[in-house]
Each structure stands twice: as structure tokens, then as C-alpha cells.
Amino acid sequence: MDFSLNDEQRQIREMVHDICLERVEPRAAEIDESGEFPWDIKELFAKHDILAIPFTPEYGGVSGSVLTLLVAVEEISKFCVTSSLILSVQSLGSLPIALAGTAEQKRKYLPPLARGEQLAAYALTESGSGSDAGGMRTRAIKRGDTYVLNGSKTFITGGSVADTVVVFARTDQNGDTPARNISAFIVEKTMPGFKVGKLEKKMGIRGSPTAQLFFEDLAVPAANRLGSEGEGFKLAMRVLDHSRPGIAAQALGIAEGAFDLARKYARDRHQFGRPIAEFQGIQFMLADMATQIEAARALTYASGDALDRRLPDISASSSMAKLFASDTAMRVTTDAVQILGGYGYLRDFPAERMMRDAKITQIYEGTNEIQRLVIAREQLKEKT
Ligand code: COS
């Protein structure tokens, strides 16, 4: 089955595939082992305009289509999930600016991101507010034409390498305004008071830095506020509606990479005098893996297409894609390790890395329990 991609999307998929096969796949195990951010891959993606895919030509980009971005993320993830995150986070961190920025903010911040000269990050989560994103404590107090930020963020993907970070903070001045008086600010890493804390040691996506960020009397010009004061929570949710299909695409790519590996191994590995692919137990596993992947791809592409066509009620389709594709990635990578048997458990083969990388897709950008909550709420809304 092939979802109807246009010529541009097919060309981008081919280009990304060729580059990743030649340059990213040979680095994937090393990146995982070292746990270091792959600056060489970031430069490679910038040079080939891969980091320009999330941006429209008006701001120096090459596409701006969500579906095109998903296809690119899927393709990179087949080879190296850490590398796919360089593109995903460039999109996530710039989405608040693209969705809510003024023309001036977009002109200033988007072109260097599209050129890959700068990196972006999205700072919503805090140690005490993960699923309950509205419970954040970082505060921005207005003083004249600046806001003074104090607080911290945690689990910020790419936070230590980003030049531009969109930070969400409470703007209720006296604690007596509505609970969700949250606003979003474009923060530059060079602003005094911006500090990077510890980098987390993780199970997977090990070359993607996950950082703590601290803001100590950090003065942000009021001109860097995104949208109206108090509108930040809704913006954060809109961004997640747009970015969750990207996690689905990542999960889909991991599942496809693991499936290809397992299929090849099943054909090559002989036991009891024949390839293990001839045993029904293996065939049934491969059949289930392939079916789940097809279904995950259909949901993922449909959610991207819905966003591109600006259809209403996209929250549920984004969450469904993320939920189903990430569960698929976990199942398929676990089965791939099983098909490879003892070899699947060794670092000599990429199956175990894919399984470790898959797990995070069920957790970040909203746990799958939160996705179910979003989907259920949409189903229970009164339909006219
Ligand atoms: N788009 C626009 N507005 C939205 C929205 C969306 N997708 N979802 C909610 N809102 C609005 C609501 O309409 C409501 O507006 P009003 O106050 O005008 O009625 C407001 O935002 C608050 O919504 P709600 O009451 O649903 O908020 P909750 O605190 O119940 O939170 C969940 C909702 C749990 C869905 C949200 O907190 C969430 O997604 N949490 C997970 C966060 C996450 O994914 N973190 C991962 C790290 S970021 S990489």
C-alpha cells in the first residue's frame, strides 16, 4: 500500500533515504554508544536542506508541509532515531513561532533555523508538571517592556544545543488570576540568566541531549512574547497537535527499520536445516508486524494530511497516530529482537537499540495515557 504522496514528497523521501543510507546508518551505533550530540549529522542535514523542510519558502524553507516532514522523519528514523530528532526538534521548537509569531518575530527567528545555522527547542515540562502541563511554576513578571523569568524546565530535548528556546511561563502577577495564565516567550541562549543544567542519562535516543534549563532573573523583551498574555497554554496544546504526528512518524520509521532487519535475518538464518522464515511461528510474527506497520502508516500520514488541509478537530487524529504508531514500534521492535534470538540481545545488531529507542515514543510529547484522554474527550464532545 502507498498513501498518495506527491512528487515533491517522493523526491524528498528518496533524497533523505540515500543520504541516511550512506552517511547516517554507519554512524548510528557509534552515536548511541557515545551518547554525544552528532554535530556532523546536523551539518549534513543543514547542507542538504533537510532542516529546511518544516519551513515555508517565505522564511527560507523548502516545504512547510506536515506530511512532507513526516515522510522525512520516518525515513531518517529507519536508520537512526537520534538523528531524526534533530529535524523533529527543529520543527517542534519553531512551531510556536510559526503558529503564533508576528511577521517580525517570524522574519527574525525562522530563517536561521531553516538554514540550520541555529537550533530550536521547546521548553514546556518541569519537574513537577509533566502530564499536567498547566501546573508549571516558572514565572514571568512584567517589568516595563520586559518580562523577568525565574524557574526551571526539565526533559528539554535539544535544550543544551539550542540557540532559540520557546519557554512557557506563568504570567499571573499576583497569584489571583485564572490558573492557566501562561504565556510563551522566545528566549535566546545568549540572554543573561539562561543556564543549562545536567544532561540526563537515558535508555535510548542517547545522542539527543535531554537537558535541564534554569532561568535566573532572565529579562526577555516583551516583543518576544508569542501571542497575547495568557494564551500560552492553548498555544502549547496547538503545537502538540501539530508535533505528535512527528512522533508517530519516528515510531513508524523505527518499526520499519526493525521489520526489515527481522525479515532479512529470518531469510538468512538456518535452523533445523532450513531458513527460520519457513517456520509458521516466524511467519505469523512477520505478518502481524507488517500489518501493524501498514495501519500505523495510514494513521500517521492521514494526521499529517489533515494538518496540511487545515481540517478541524485535529487533536484526536494526531493523538491516535502517536498512540498507535508508538505502540506498534514497541511491539515490532520487541518481536524483531525475538526473531534475532540471542543475537537480537547483542549490541552487534541494531535490534536492541531500536527497542530501546522505541520506548520513548510511548512517553514523550504526552504519554500514551494522555493521548487516550485527548481522544476520549474528542469522542465525548457534543457533535452537531
Ligand atoms: N488546542 C487549543 N486549545 C486547547 C487544546 C488544543 N489542542 N487543548 C485544550 N485547549 C484549551 C481548552 O479548550 C481550554 O480552554 P478554556 O480554558 O478556554 O476552556 C484550555 O486549553 C485548558 O484545557 P483543558 O482543561 O483540557 O486542560 P487540562 O489541564 O485538562 O490538560 C491535557 C489537558 C492533559 C490534554 C494537557 O495538559 C496535555 O496535553 N498534557 C500533556 C502535556 C505533554 O504532552 N507534555 C509532553 C512534553 S512537551 S514535548
Image (tube, rainbow, N blue to C red):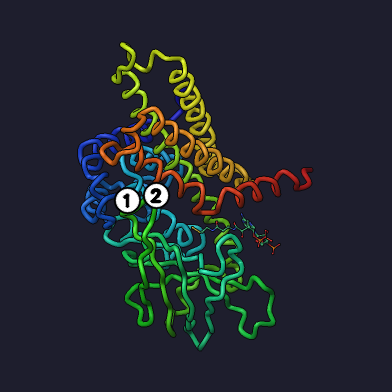
Q: Disc 1 to disc 2, how far (Cα)?
A: 7 Å
Q: Nearer the viewer, residue 362 or 203?
A: 203
In-front residue for pair 33/209: 33
**Residue receiving disc 2:** 54
x, y (%) of residue 139?
54, 79
Q: Residue at x 64, y 46 (%)?
A: 372
Residue 235 placed where, x, y %? 56, 61
Location of residue 101 with respect to 281 vertically, above or below = below
The reply to whether dot 1 and dot 2 touch (C-beta < 8 Å) is yes
Q: How many marks?
A: 2
Q: Is residue 203 above or below residue 138?
A: above
As drawn, 10 above or below 379 = above
Residue 332 placed where, x, y %? 45, 33
Residue pictured at 42% horizontal, 43% vertical: 250
Indicate the quadrant containing the C terminus: top left, top right, bottom left or bottom right: top right
Q: Secondary structure at mark 1?
A: loop
Instruction: Give the residue drawn at x 58%, y 64%.
Output: 133
Q: Which mark is residue 233?
A: none
Which residue in the rendered view is the most extreme toward the top?
273
Q: Nearest the camera: 323 or 143?
A: 323
Q: Amino acid at mark 2?
A: Pro
Return the residue at label 1.
51
Query: What's under tag 1, amino acid-wise?
Result: Leu
Q: Residue furthest bottom?
A: 144
Residue 108 in sight here: no
